[in-house]
Image: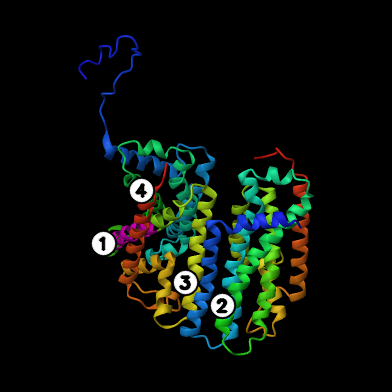
């Protein structure tokens, strides 16, 4: 890690117009939770919070979109602006550059999604015992942010079209293919996240079901994050200055 | 004009001539822009790789009609209606959305990317004319998905039936309805996707933003209508273009939503959806015009 890079990246990420849009987007689950609280009809609050709010809205849309925007911008915007040359010609090991960038992307994504899930969840679940749903989703979302961001940072080094590739992964692969073919669950960070969330709750299968078992999901998530980070470090280490603009 | 063959200056005469041919004016400029954009929407006059996606999606949108006609030709049954005209949109909605995502950035952002926008704006064309020409082009392109297959289906069904004139006499009212519903669907999708595509000059961002608009609005609408009762749950179906369009088509055909669907649960009168569709189309078009009035070229 390098403090200067971390601070610089934080300024770059938070100063964009896109980040403001993301904050607005993170408020949508909160709004829907308020609507549920005052107008909702489902009797089972835990079930609604876990399936609709947690799995569908937050893990299904907010988390991947926040991660793809922060993850691909953290390092990708340096390539885009042509400032990567100045960064990479500093006497810093490339692995520290990657790790610093990844840390900021993870913190930005994690903080935004975590705030959304905790506030919206607390509103929706009311005063009844939540069977660990809030804690489960908080931990799962924090871990899922890291997995998503590491993959998207890797993408931003490999291709100059990381944003569109990442969104295709999120919408087409995770959204469409996983709905059609259940075998693709082992290659879907969304399913890992839901699996981990389920593992940490004490809810019954009927209330909240996940496609992957908890330990399996966590193991896949750890493997995916480490592999993506390692590949990102390797790809950046071999990136030669002057190779592309 | 009379002195056009006389030299204009004595020393520095470089032989420049005034243009005194016909000036075709604003209307002609708009028409040319419209035709050029419409051709561009299907990649005509461009390289092969930009033809593949729009034409493939248009073929996908026509596939249900072709299958129905093929089955009808073989089985030749009078009452075989696999696809009712009011349900046709349900089969092609994903194709329509993907077509918008692929084509709207071609129609809208291309002149900004190639920096030809100043050239357009220095002509007789007004900025609002430019936007309206582009809108009309995308609208017409979408008609090839939302109207043409159904019109072919209507004609083909009649020809396949043993009593063609009888078929057309019984079902002639369907034709104006097919025209109206196809035009309305195309108008909403064209103006919404151009509104999103106009926000950025970069094609990848525009494509993804259009897809994100469709996906996110559907998810939010679905979640709200599954969550809340009362007015909120009813109004939630108005949040996604797919349900608005489906309901408007049903209203045009004077038909009812399938029981159990989100529309049946919402149970709103059809003209509400029609009004929503018109309002959304008009507001989106106005916002695009406003953006182009202010854009710096």
Residue at the spot of label 2: A120
Earlier-in-chain disc, 4 versus 1 = 1
Q: Secondary structure at mark 2?
A: helix
Q: Above or below — where is B15 with respect to A201?
A: above
Asked if residue A172 is among those painted magenta in the image, a careful observer would answer no
Q: What segment carries the magenta color? A: B173-188
CA gap, disc 4 and disc 1: 49 Å
CA gap, disc 4 and disc 2: 40 Å
Pointer 4 and pointer 3 on the same chain = yes
Which quadrant: the N terminus of chain B? top left
Judged by depth in the image, the label closer to the viewer, 4 or 1, is: 4
Pointer 1 and pointer 2 on the same chain = no
Residue at the spot of label 4: B293
Q: Secondary structure at mark 1?
A: helix
Contact? badges 4 and 2 (CB < 8 Å) = no
Residue at the spot of label 3: B221
Judged by depth in the image, the label closer to the viewer, 3 or 1, is: 3
Q: Above or below — where is B129 with respect to A213?
A: above
Contact? badges 4 and 3 (CB < 8 Å) = no
In this rendering, position of residue A216 left or right of residue B250: right
Pick the front one: A63 or A205 = A63
Residue at the spot of label 1: B169
Question: Where residue B52 sits in the image (x, y, percent)?
Answer: 52, 45
Contact? badges 2 and 3 (CB < 8 Å) = no
In this rendering, position of residue B226 left or right of residue B148: right
Which quadrant: the C terminus of chain B? top left
Earlier-in-chain disc, 4 versus 3 = 3
Q: Secondary structure at mark 3?
A: helix
Pointer 2 and pointer 3 on the same chain = no
């Amino acid at each position: 890690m390098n403090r200067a890079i971390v601070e610089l990246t934080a300024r770059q990420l938070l100063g964009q117009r896109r980040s403001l849009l993301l904050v607005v987007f993170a408020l949508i689950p909160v709004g829907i939770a308020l609507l549920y609280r005052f107008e909702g009809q489902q009797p089972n609050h835990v079930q609604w919070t876990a399936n609709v709010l947690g799995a569908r809205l937050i893990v299904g849309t907010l988390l991947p979109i926040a991660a793809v925007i922060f993850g691909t911008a953290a390092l990708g915007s340096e390539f885009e602006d042509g400032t990567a040359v100045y960064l990479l010609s500093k006497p810093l090991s490339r692995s520290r550059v990657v790790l610093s960038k990844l840390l900021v992307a993870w913190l930005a994504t994690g903080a935004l999604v975590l705030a959304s899930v905790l506030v919206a969840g607390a509103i929706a679940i009311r005063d009844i015992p939540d069977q660990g749903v809030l804690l489960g989703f908080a931990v799962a979302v924090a871990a899922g942010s890291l997995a998503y961001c590491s993959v998207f940072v890797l993408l931003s080094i490999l291709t100059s079209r990381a944003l569109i590739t990442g969104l295709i992964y999120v919408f087409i692969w995770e959204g469409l293919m996983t709905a059609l073919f259940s075998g693709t669950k082992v290659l879907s960070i969304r399913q890992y996240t839901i699996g981990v969330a389920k593992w940490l709750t004490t809810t019954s299968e009927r209330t909240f079901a996940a496609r992957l078992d908890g330990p399996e999901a966590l193991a896949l998530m750890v493997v995916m994050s480490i592999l993506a980070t390692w590949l990102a470090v390797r790809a950046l280490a071999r990136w030669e200055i002057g190779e592309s603009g | 004009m009379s002195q056009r063959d006389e030299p204009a200056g004595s020393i520095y005469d470089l032989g420049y001539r005034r243009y005194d041919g016909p000036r075709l004016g604003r209307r002609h400029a708009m028409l040319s822009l419209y035709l050029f954009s419409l051709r561009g929407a299907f990649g005509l006059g461009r390289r092969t790789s930009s033809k593949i996606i729009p034409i493939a999606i248009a073929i996908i949108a026509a596939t249900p009609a072709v299958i129905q006609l093929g089955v009808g030709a073989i089985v030749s049954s009078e009452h075989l209606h696999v696809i009712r005209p009011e349900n046709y949109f349900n089969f092609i909605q994903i194709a329509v959305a993907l077509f918008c995502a692929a084509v709207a950035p071609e129609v809208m952002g291309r002149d900004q990317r190639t920096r030809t926008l100043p050239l357009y704006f220095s002509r007789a064309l007004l900025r609002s004319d430019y936007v309206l020409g582009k809108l009309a082009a995308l609208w017409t392109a979408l008609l090839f998905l939302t109207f043409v297959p159904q019109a072919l289906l209507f004609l083909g069904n009649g020809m396949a039936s043993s009593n063609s004139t009888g078929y057309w006499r019984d079902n002639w009212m369907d034709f104006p309805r097919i025209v109206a519903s196809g035009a309305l669907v195309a108008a909403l999708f064209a103006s919404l996707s151009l509104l999103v595509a106009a926000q950025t000059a970069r094609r990848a961002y525009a494509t993804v933003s259009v897809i994100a608009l469709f996906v996110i609005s559907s998810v939010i609408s679905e979640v709200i209508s599954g969550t809340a009762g009362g007015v909120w749950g009813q109004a939630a179906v108005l949040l996604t273009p797919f349900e608005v369009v489906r309901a408007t088509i049903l209203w045009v055909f004077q038909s009812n939503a399938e029981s159990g669907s989100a529309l049946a649960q919402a149970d709103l009168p059809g003209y509400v959806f029609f009004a929503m569709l018109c309002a959304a189309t008009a507001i989106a078009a106005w916002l695009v015009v406003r953006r182009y009035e202010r854009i710096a070229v």
